[in-house]
């Protein structure tokens, strides 16, 4: 069966990207209130997506169903290493999301794979990403793709919780 | 009768004259991290880059670099531990934009268990909050159980896992 086509994002995709990104962030916040959005987040991301699409160090790909409905996206970037630890250049996957009705068809795997292929073409051989601790599905997904845990990021409010 | 108190660690801000000791401590920190986690191995010029970075970092108001010695009242005691933090102004995506990051905490092995790390983290936290931090974060390599436990005792909870994959592995 032929999958939903994946292509590089264009400026015209920004409204769809914002819808998908908003849905992704709502899912994050429902799972963990620490991912509550800033009031200006949507406006910020509108300009950010526009910049990413123009930026040669950035990759934004979309899955477009029947040539008109964007149902998933993924984004990555090439970064310099920190200067004292390997690697010299580092790829980072910042976002991967598929609309709920189109899940379990391998689309996220193909989107992430496309981003990794494009990062590799840009000279990157190590890629990192962050997944929410409470998003067990995402963690299982990435680990099934050969990713391994590197660090745990811990957070506390300025006034620690009593629990 | 007043019971004698155990020596309390002294913590102070790093100065430019501390460059050598800071660099030595940081290289030991990075070396231990690389030993424990080969994916964090050092670049050949890591020491030179560290020597160049510290003077720049010391000039940044958003960065806090601390040194600790085993006991109070010994201003010239050789520091045996350091910590570094950063107040990062994140883009307006998450509600909390002012993130205080505890980047590095290191105590030489012979002085572990003396409360130096806890004191450094406490002073660093106060400094970051004083600069406007709304939340505090710290990244710990997986498997560093003691460091993770120390942070959890201080109220930290896991937020994210940083994952890595080599693209050369196929």
Image: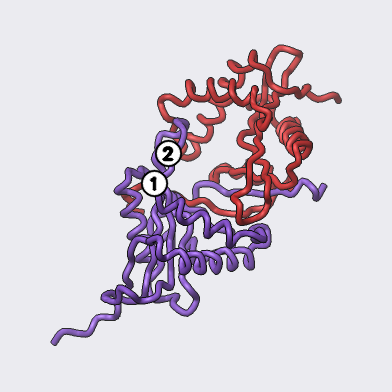
Chain colours: A red, B purple
The subunit carrying tag 1 is B
Residue A106 drawn at (x, y percent): 75, 33
* Dot 1 or dot 2, earlier in sequence: 1
- Observer-nearest of A105 and B128: B128
Neighbor class of circle 1 (other Cα within 10 Å; few <14, some 14-19, many 20+) is: some
Residue B88 drawn at (x, y percent): 43, 43
Q: Residue at x 85, y 24 (%)?
A: A2
Residue furthest out toward the right: A1
Quarter of the image with the N terminus of chain A is: top right
Do tag 1 and tag 2 residues touch (Cβ < 8 Å)? yes
In three-dimensional space, the C-alpha distance between marks 1 and 2, rounded to whole angstroms, equals: 9 Å
Residue labelled with disc 1: B62
Residue B128 drawn at (x, y percent): 35, 50
- Observer-nearest of A110 and B18: B18
Residue labelled with disc 2: B89
The subunit carrying tag 2 is B
Quarter of the image with the C terminus of chain A is: bottom left
């Amino acid at each position: 069966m032929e999958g939903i086509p994946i292509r590089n994002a264009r400026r015209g995709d920004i409204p769809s990207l914002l819808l998908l990104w908003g849905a992704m962030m709502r899912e994050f916040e429902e799972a963990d209130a620490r991912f509550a959005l800033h009031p200006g987040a949507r406006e910020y991301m509108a300009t950010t997506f526009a910049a990413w699409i123009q930026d040669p160090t950035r990759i934004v790909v979309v899955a477009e169903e029947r040539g008109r409905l964007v149902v998933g996206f993924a984004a990555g970037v090439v970064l310099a290493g920190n200067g004292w630890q390997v690697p010299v250049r580092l790829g980072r996957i910042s976002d991967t999301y598929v609309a709920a009705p189109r899940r379990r068809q391998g689309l996220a795997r193909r989107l992430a794979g496309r981003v990794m292929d494009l990062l590799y073409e840009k000279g990157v051989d190590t890629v990192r990403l962050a997944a929410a601790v409470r998003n067990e599905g995402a963690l299982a997904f990435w680990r099934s793709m050969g990713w391994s845990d590197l660090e745990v990021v811990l957070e506390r409010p300025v006034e620690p919780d009593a629990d | 009768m007043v019971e004698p108190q155990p020596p309390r660690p002294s913590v102070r801000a790093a100065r430019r004259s501390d460059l050598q000791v800071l660099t030595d401590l940081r290289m030991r920190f990075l070396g231990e991290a690389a030993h424990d986690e080969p994916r964090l191995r050092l670049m050949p010029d890591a020491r030179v880059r560290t020597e160049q970075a510290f003077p720049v970092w010391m000039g940044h108001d958003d960065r806090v670099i601390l040194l600790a010695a085993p006991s109070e009242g010994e201003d010239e005691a050789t520091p045996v531990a350091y910590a570094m933090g950063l107040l990062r102004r994140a883009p307006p995506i998450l509600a909390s934009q002012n993130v205080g990051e505890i980047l590095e905490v290191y105590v030489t092995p012979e002085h572990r268990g003396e409360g130096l790390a806890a004191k450094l983290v406490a002073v660093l936290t106060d400094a970051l909050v004083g600069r406007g931090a709304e939340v505090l974060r710290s990244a710990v390599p997986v498997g560093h159980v003691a460091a993770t436990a120390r942070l959890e005792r201080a109220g930290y909870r896991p937020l994210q896992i940083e994952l890595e994959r080599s693209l050369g592995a196929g």
